Image: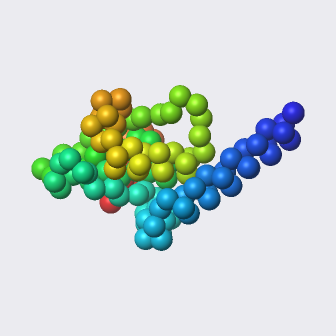
Amino acid sequence: MFLGWLRRRRNANRQAAALVRQVLSQDEQAQLRRDGFLEVPSQEVSGRTYRIPRRGSPVAVLEPDGNVRYLCLQPETPVAPAELVVVHKLLLEGAEGDYWHRANLVGRAMGRGFGRRLLG
């Protein structure tokens, strides 16, 4: 039973890695490896940037006025972390308003030191 679960998990991670290679540019993949997050510029607000962490959530929202907010949006069914980065990117680029409508605004990044890393 455990070995079956482990095989399914490895297969899901391989498929997610393949999806990342298909969807993200070489520069985006390098940024994700180097910085631990992917930056996505807002389509709706000039100067707003989203930073999607490698593990997918919470997404840091860097506002043009210097304020930072954090959004949390999780799929109903579990997905591999790499796939979650792609999901956030595609939603933010294609349906930013809907993303904001569905996401939860959280007070700060979760985990010790993680928020500082997102802020660079």
Q: Residue at x 30, y 30 (%)?
A: 101
Q: What colour scheme governs how the chains and residues are painted in the rendered image of this protein?
A: rainbow
Query: Where does the image place residue 21, in percent across and percent down from the top left?
Result: 56, 63
Q: Please state if 23 lies on the left or on the right of 18 as rendered.
A: left
Which quadrant: the N terminus?
top right
Q: Quadrant of residue 105?
A: top left
Can the viewer see residue 54?
yes
Q: Please state if 36 lies on the left or on the right of 11 as rendered.
A: left
With respect to residue 93, does 22 lie above or below? below
Q: Residue at x 28, y 56 (%)?
A: 41
Q: Nearer the viewer, residue 62 or 41?
A: 41
The total of numbered circles placed on residues is 0
Name the residue furthest front: 94
Q: Residue at x 32, y 60 (%)?
A: 120
Q: Residue at x 41, y 48 (%)?
A: 90
Q: Please state if 44 lies on the left or on the right of 89 as rendered.
A: left
Name the residue furthest left: 65
Q: Nearer the viewer, residue 58 or 86?
A: 86
Q: Nearer the viewer, residue 43 or 9?
A: 43
Can the viewer see residue 119?
no
Q: Please state if 106 lies on the left or on the right of 45 as rendered.
A: right
Query: Where does the image place residue 4, in percent across and percent down from the top left?
Result: 84, 39
Query: Where does the image place residue 116, in percent across and percent down from the top left?
Result: 35, 52
Query: Where does the image place residue 2, in percent across and percent down from the top left?
Result: 84, 36
